[in-house]
């Protein structure tokens, strides 16, 4: 029998330390989080704000967050499905929607701290580089750090649209144009890259979606009707795209709170396990039972099973 090399000894397993739960689940990069959350001791527990940007299969979510010992506290939040109240009823996960969501978050944060009148942000959306800290103001701007989570920071990603929206909205987020759409890397290391602001502007106003719509309309009308069925249902065609986003940006700047959702006046009546609603629907909801009742229920099931076995 050949010798087996012991790679992991008993000492290894004694000293083994289980990783944090969210690391095991692959949800949090603690190496990055530690750097973003750490605060200097001489700053006396000052809050360190982060702009958290996340994407799901249906929407973009932006939050302004600061960390405490008890957990993260959300100052303000905005999601792309809220854009329906500002006129963007469809396309809630593209680059233009991400920009509008970032803009909405910035205006909400500044309004909460009564800074919305002091820091208007960039009102002319031309895609040019903008830093609110370069402007002359009596007060320093509201500073945040970008938190992208586990997303890979590749050039032209939608996260940069949300970042650009937050920056144009008046937040101070340290960044550069190197990852924005329209940036060209230099051919040699000694040279500087070129940033095409016009290409970025086209993304902000959804022109890339507009061009794809026009191409499908001409080449494959059946595919166009399938892919853009929600756009067609809302009466939005390629020519109305830019106007839709322009009007939404103006509405967000004028009042970022949005219209509150209407409450449904539905009452419920319970009849044992059945819950009847005033709109005619019925739901089954089991009643809560005590520990004694639960034990009696289990004992009855065991007795019934034993009786059945005896009969057989």
Image (cartoon, rainbow, N blue to C red):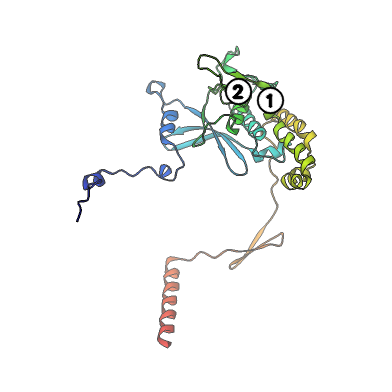
Say few, some or many: other residues with alpha carbon within 10 Å of mark 2 (under 14 / 14 to 19 / 20 or more).
some
- Closer to the camera in the image, 180 or 141: 180
Residue 255 image point, x, y percent: 69, 30
Q: Position of residue 64 (x, y in %)?
A: 54, 32
Label placed on residue 232: none
User: Could you say which disc has been placed on residue 183 in the image?
Assistant: 2
In this view, 289 is above or below 207: below
Q: Which residue is mark 1?
A: 201
Q: Determine whether, in the image, residue 63 is placed left or right of residue 3.
A: right
**Residue situated in front as seen by the camera: 3 or 19:** 3
Q: Residue at x 77, y 48 (%)?
A: 222
Task: In this rendered view, identify the residue nearer to me: 181 or 297.
Answer: 181
Task: Please rate how many residues cluster around mark 1, counting C-alpha atoms within 10 Å: few if below 14, some from 14 to 19, many from 20.
Answer: some
Task: Give x and y (percent) for residue 261.
Answer: 69, 43
**SS assignment at label 2:** strand
Depicted 3 relative to depicted 69: above or below: below
| Residue 310 seen in this snapshot | yes
**Quadrant where the N terminus lies?**
bottom left
- Identity of the residue drawn at 60% across and 23% down: 183
Relative to residue 74, is residue 259 drawn left or right?
right
Of residue 223 and residue 232, the one placed in the foreground of this image is 223
Name which quarter of the figure residue 257 lies in.
top right
Which x, y percent locates residue 132? 59, 18
Q: Is residue 78 above or below residue 171?
A: below
Residue 108, quarter of picture:
top right
Asked if 272 appears above or below 21 in the picture, the reply is below
Q: Nearer the viewer, mark 1 or mark 2?
A: 2
User: Residue drawn 60% across and 18% down?
Assistant: 194
Name the quadrant containing residue 90.
top right
- Which element type, helix, strand or loop, lies under badge 1? helix
Q: Which part of the image, by quadrant, shows the C terminus?
A: bottom left
């Amino acid at each position: 029998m050949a010798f087996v090399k012991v790679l992991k000894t008993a000492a290894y397993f004694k000293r083994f330390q289980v990783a944090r739960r969210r690391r095991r689940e692959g949800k949090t990069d603690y190496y990055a989080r530690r750097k973003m959350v750490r605060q200097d001791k001489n700053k006396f527990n000052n809050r360190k704000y982060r702009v958290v940007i996340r994407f799901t299969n249906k929407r973009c979510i932006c939050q302004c967050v600061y960390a405490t010992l008890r957990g993260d506290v959300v100052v303000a939040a905005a999601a792309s499905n809220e854009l329906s109240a500002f006129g963007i009823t469809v396309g809630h996960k593209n680059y233009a929607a991400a920009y509008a969501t970032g803009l909405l978050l910035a205006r909400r944060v500044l309004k909460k701290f009564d800074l919305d009148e002091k820091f208007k942000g960039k009102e002319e959306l031309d895609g040019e580089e903008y830093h609110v800290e370069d402007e002359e103001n009596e007060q320093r701007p509201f500073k945040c750090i970008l938190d992208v989570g586990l997303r890979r920071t590749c050039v032209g990603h939608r996260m940069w649209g949300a970042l650009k929206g937050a920056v144009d909205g008046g937040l101070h987020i340290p960044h550069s144009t190197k990852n924005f759409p329209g940036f060209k890397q230099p051919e040699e290391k000694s040279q500087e890259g070129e940033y095409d602001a016009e290409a970025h502007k086209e993304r902000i106003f959804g022109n890339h979606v507009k061009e794809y719509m026009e191409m499908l309309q001409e080449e494959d009308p059946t595919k166009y009707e399938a892919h853009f069925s929600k756009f067609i249902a809302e009466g939005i065609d390629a020519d109305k795209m830019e106007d839709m986003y322009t009007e939404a940006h103006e509405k967000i700047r004028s009042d970022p709170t949005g219209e509150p959702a209407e409450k449904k006046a539905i009452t419920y009546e319970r009849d044992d396990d059945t819950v009847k609603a005033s709109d005619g629907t019925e739901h089954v909801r089991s009643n809560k039972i005590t520990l004694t009742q639960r034990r009696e229920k289990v004992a009855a099931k065991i007795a019934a099973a034993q009786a059945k076995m005896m009969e057989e």
